[in-house]
Image: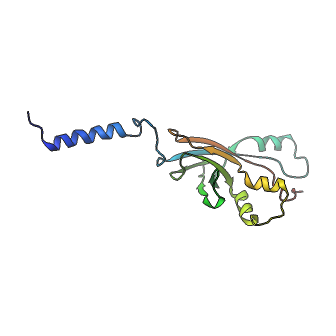
Amino acid sequence: MKYSASKEVLVLSALAVFCCSKKNHPFGASHKDSITLMVTKTSDYCGGIDPGEETLTQLKTPSRLTNNELYFVEIGQPLNTSILLETDENGNASSRELKMSTYQIFSKPKWLFINKHRSRLNYPTSCTEWIEVGEAQLEIVEGQAEYKINIHSTCNPCESPSR
């Protein structure tokens, strides 16, 4: 029985597609797949007057971070290597740029503060530590495409508290 070359190519192509598709790949999703994030926010109270229990509870309760910019910096990399993602009206974001690694995440207000004041040298230690630490951390792992993260904003020790 004779086989034509075109039939062999067709069979081998179908086999390659089946064996190497994402769902059948032994290593799961590659870094080129889109990562989806559902982002919430919480915050410390940074004012001067006691706000009352209701306000404190509200600040500690996660709510969707909608229509906002987030800056992702891979651990060990300089801040100028950040990846910008924007959340939508539901607090979701997606990216094909994030690869398997661990990232610090900065909200837009903190990011703007850091970039405006980065060159100052006389900050107290508490301020320097605050600048160097993101408001959340995310580890992208092999085979996982969906993540939930909470951005927790702490009081800025580099500025005086609101009154």
Judging from the image, the colouring scheme is: rainbow
Q: Please name the residue shown 91% across and 50% down the image.
A: 49
Considering every residue shown, the one lying at the far top of the view is: 1
Considering every residue shown, the one lying at the far front of the view is: 76
Q: Please name the residue shown 71% across and 42% down the image.
A: 62
- Total number of numbered labels? 0
Position of 156 with respect to 37 (left or right) is right
Q: Quadrant of the N terminus?
A: top left
The residue nearer to you, when weighing 33 against 55, is: 33
The residue nearer to you, when weighing 59 against 131, is: 131
Visible in this render: residue 130? yes
Q: Position of residue 9 (x, y in %)?
A: 21, 43
Q: Position of residue 43 (x, y in %)?
A: 77, 47
State the image quarter where residue 150 is shown. Answer: top right
Visible in this render: residue 67? no
Position of 44 with respect to 73 (left or right) is right
Q: Position of residue 69 (x, y in %)?
A: 64, 56
Q: Position of residue 109 (x, y in %)?
A: 72, 58
Q: Quadrant of the C terminus?
A: bottom right
**98, above or below 2, in the image:** below
State the image quarter where residue 114 is shown. Answer: bottom right
Q: Please name the residue shown 84% across and 63% down the image.
A: 122
**82, above or below 20, in the image:** below
Q: Please name the residue shown 74% across and 40% down the image.
A: 61
**1, above or below 69, in the image:** above
Position of 48 with respect to 145 (left or right) is right
Considering every residue shown, the one lying at the far right of the view is: 49
The residue nearer to you, when weighing 43 against 21, is: 21
